[in-house]
Image (spheres, helix red, strand yellow):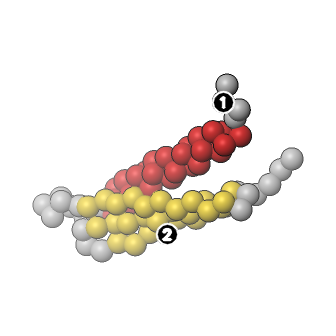
Amino acid sequence: MEHDVTIAVHLSEDDTDTLATMTLELRGDHFEAVGKARRNPIDPPLPTIGEELAIARALSNLEEAVMEAARDRIERFTVHV
C-alpha cells in the first residue's frame, strides 16, 4: 500500500534570527514543529547556516512529536498483561 506524506517547511528570518516552521501530514494526523537559530552579532551574515540550524532543530522537534504519537498509539493498542 502506498500513500502520500506531506512535509512543508516555512522559513522566516531577519538580520539575526531564523525560524523554521515544519508541518507533517500523515494519514490524517497533523504534526507541527519549530526550530530557531540566532546569529551572534559579531559573526558574518551567512543566512544558509542559520537556515540549516533552524531546519535541523525543527526536524529534531518533529521527530520527537512523531515518536511520541507512535508510542501513544502503541500503548493504546497493546494489551497489558
Residue furthest right in the image: 1
Q: Quadrant of the C terminus?
A: top right
Point out the frontmost of discs 2 and 1: 1
Contact check, label 2 and label 1, Cβ < 8 Å = no
Q: To which residue does mark 1 refer?
A: 80
Residue furthest top in the image: 81
Q: Amino acid at mark 2?
A: His
Q: Pinpoint residue 17: horizontal percent, then vertical percent.
A: 28, 67
The disc, 2 or 1, on the residue closer to the chain's N-terminal end is: 2
Q: Amino acid at mark 1?
A: His
Viewer-closest of 26 and 47: 26
Determine which quarter of the picture holds residue 27: bottom right
Q: To which residue does mark 2 refer?
A: 10
Tally of marks: 2
Mark 2 falls on what kind of element? strand
Determine which quarter of the picture holds residue 48: bottom left
Task: Look at the image and tell me whether residue 52 can be seen.
Answer: no
Residue 77 lies, with reference to residue 6, above or below; the image says above
Mark 1 falls on what kind of element? loop
Viewer-closest of 61 and 41: 61
Residue 56 lies, with reference to residue 15, above or below; the image says above
Q: Pinpoint residue 60: horizontal percent, then vertical percent.
A: 45, 48
Residue depicted at 49% across the width and 46% down the height: 64
Residue 64 lies, with reference to residue 14, above or below; the image says above
Residue depicted at 59% across the width and 48% down the height: 69
Residue depicted at 35% across the width and 72% down the height: 13
Residue furthest front in the image: 81
Instruction: Determine whether, in the image, residue 73 is placed left or right of residue 31.
Output: right
Count neighbours of disc 2 (C-alpha within 10 A) and say few if under 14, some if 14 to 19, many if 20 or more: few
